[in-house]
Amino acid sequence: PANDIDSLRRPLIAGSEKVQQQIIPQLAELGNEGLDVLMEFLLKRRENPATWVDGKAYQVLYNSDAPQAKEFLRSCFPEGIVPLKSECGINYNSLQQLLAVQDFQAADRVTIEKMCELSGPTAVQRKWLYFTEVENTSAVDLQTINNLWLVHSEGKFGFSVQREIWLSLGKNWENFWPKIGWKAGNSWTRYPNEFTWDLSAPRGHLPLSNQLRGVRVFASLLSHPAWSKNPE
Ligand code: UYC
C-alpha cells in the first residue's frame, strides 16, 4: 500500500478536479494511510475557501469510523469546512451534518426550515415564504446555505447553480423546470418521491422550492443580491 499511497498523493494535490474526484475514494479504500493523506490535503488547503473537492475529502473522513479521523475533525474542523456565518444568529450545523452524510432529502427539509427562520417567527409558523421576505433575507446567510450545498454536492446543487441555469435560459420557467428535473412534459415532479435525492439528479435539482403558490418567491431567491455580490 505504501506504493499506492505515493502514487495517489501527488495527483491528489496537483491533479485536476476530475482526477482528485477519482482519487479520493481510492484513498478511502486504503485504510489509515489513505485517511492520513486526506487529512494532510484538507489542512494544506484550509486557507482557501472550501471547494467541492474539499467536500469529498471531508465526507470520507466524516463518515469514517477511524478514531484518528474523528479526532482530526474534532480538533481542526469541528463545524465542517464551510464557515457557518450567520447575521441572524442561526445555527447551520444540522444542515452541514446532513449534507456531510449526503442525506439530501433531510437537508432539503432543513433548508426550507432555515429559510423560514431567517424571515422570522411568522414565516416559521406559516412554513412558507412571501417574496418580500426573500428579498429581505440576509445575503451572508443565503451564501452560507448555498456554500454548504455546493461543497457537499460536487458543485451540482445550490441556489447559485439554479440561478446560473435560469439565466442561461433567459429566465424561461417552462424551459427551466424540465432542465432541473422538476417537470416532465405536462407533469410536475411529485414531492417527495419523484425527486432524485442523490448526485445522479440533474444539475440544479436541489434544493427544492415549492411552486404551488407561483414563481414569485423562487424568482426573488434567484435574483437575490447574494449571488452577484462578492462573498463577505
Ligand atoms: N413540489 O411539485 N406541493 C411541497 C415541489 C408544485 C404541492 C413541498 C417542487 C406544483 C402540494 C416541497 C415541485 C404542485 C404540497 C415541494 C413540486 C405542487 C406540496 C413541501 C415541482 C401541484 C403540500 C414543503 C415544481 C401541481 C403542501 C412545502 C401544501 C409540498 C416542492 C403541489 C418542497 C419543486 C405546482 C399540494 N412541494 N407543488 O412547501 O402547501 O409545503 O399544500 O410546485
Image: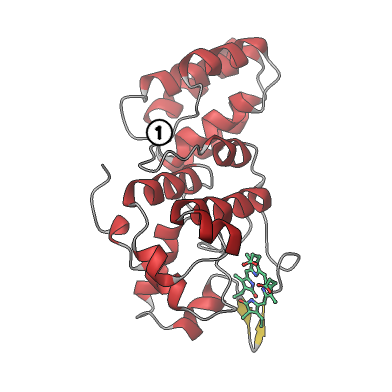
Which one is in front, 161 or 9? 161
Q: Amino acid at mark 1?
A: Pro
Residue 36, image quadrant: top right
Residue drawn at the location 58% of the way across and 32% of the way down: 59
Vertical side of 126 occupied by 12: above or below: above
Query: Where is residue 180 drawn, in percent x and y?
Result: 54, 70
- Is residue 199 something that shows in the picture? no
Which one is in front, 25 or 155? 155
Query: Residue tagged by mark 1?
Result: 83
Query: Residue reaching furthest left?
Result: 230
Which one is in front, 137 or 203? 137
> What is the basis of the colouring in this image?
secondary structure
Residue drawn at the location 50% of the way across and 13% of the way down: 75
Query: Residue reaching furthest right?
Result: 193
Mark 1 residue's CB less than 8 Å from ligand 1:
no
Residue 81, image quadrant: top left
Q: Secondary structure at mark 1?
A: loop
Query: Where is residue 154 drawn, in percent x and y?
Result: 50, 47
Vertical side of 219 occupied by 127: above or below: above
Vertical side of 50 occupied by 127: above or below: below
Query: Where is residue 64 drawn, in percent x and y?
Result: 67, 23
Assess disc 1: are there few (<14), some (14-19) or many (≥20) residues with their C-alpha within 10 Å of its C-alpha: some
Residue drawn at the location 38% of the way across and 79% of the way down: 171
The quarter of the rendered structure image containing the N terminus is top right
Residue drawn at the location 23% of the way across and 54% of the way down: 229
Query: Residue reaching furthest bottom?
Result: 186
Label tally: 1
Query: Where is residue 232 drawn, in percent x and y?
Result: 26, 42
Asked if residue 231 lies left or right of residue 173, the reply is left
- Is residue 84 something that shows in the picture? yes
